[in-house]
């Protein structure tokens, strides 16, 4: 198998993972909307924490992550609650700007491609 074919296989696997991940996320947001309708604030907060735990488990599940053979980098965005971090990530992932961001934030996955050039003197 050529290295180009191997890279294409990895790229396709990453795209499939992104599609699977994005198919679940709308349902998670729907649960958050239902929680917002709960009048008992203590119950609502308990439910919210449970959904966050489920979301974290989903994001970190081996079923939803690729093997260690794929090199990866984690990127963190820092800023205040209203700084627009989620809107920036959403814009990068989808190409569309969404001003009204979720107060719960989100977890995102995106395939990145870049070229690293090393120059030796």
Image: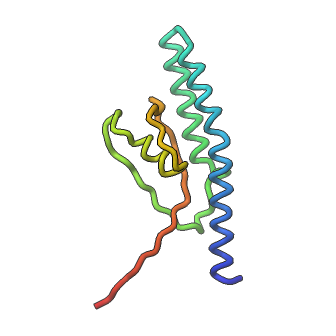
Total tally of numbered discs in the picture: 0
Location of residue 46 with respect to 65 vertically, above or below:
above
Image coordinates for residue 102, horizontal then vertical, percent:
48, 31
What sort of colour scheme is used for the picture?
Answer: rainbow
Instruction: Name the foreground residue: 6 vs 100.
Output: 100
Location of residue 9 with respect to 26 vertically, above or below: below
Looking at the image, the residue that sits furthest to the bottom is 121
Q: Position of residue 118 (x, y in %)?
A: 37, 82
From the viewer's side, name the closer residue of 103 and 68: 103
Q: Residue at x 52, y 16 (%)?
A: 44
Q: Look at the image and tell me in which quarter the N terminus lies.
A: bottom right
Residue furthest toward the front?
Answer: 96
Q: Where does the image place residue 22, in percent across and percent down from the top left?
A: 63, 44
Q: Position of residue 32 (x, y in %)?
A: 56, 25
The outermost residue toward the right is: 1
Q: Is residue 94 above or below residue 37?
A: below
Q: Residue at x 53, y 8 (%)?
A: 39
Point out the image quarter for the C terminus.
bottom left
Query: Which one is in front, 50 or 114?
Result: 114
Q: Residue at x 58, y 67 (%)?
A: 70
Q: Residue at x 65, y 32 (%)?
A: 27
Image quadrant of residue 3?
bottom right
């Amino acid at each position: 198998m050529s290295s180009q074919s191997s890279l294409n296989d990895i790229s396709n696997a990453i795209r499939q993972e992104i599609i699977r991940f994005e198919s679940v996320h709308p349902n998670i947001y729907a649960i958050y909307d239902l929680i917002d309708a709960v009048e008992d604030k203590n119950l609502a907060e308990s439910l919210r924490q449970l959904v966050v735990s489920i979301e974290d488990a989903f994001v970190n599940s081996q079923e939803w992550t690729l093997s260690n053979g794929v090199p990866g980098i984690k990127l963190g965005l820092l800023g205040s609650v209203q700084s627009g971090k989620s809107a920036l990530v959403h814009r990068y992932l989808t190409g569309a700007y969404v001003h009204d961001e979720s107060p719960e934030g989100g977890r995102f996955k995106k395939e990145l491609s870049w070229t690293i050039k090393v120059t030796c003197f």
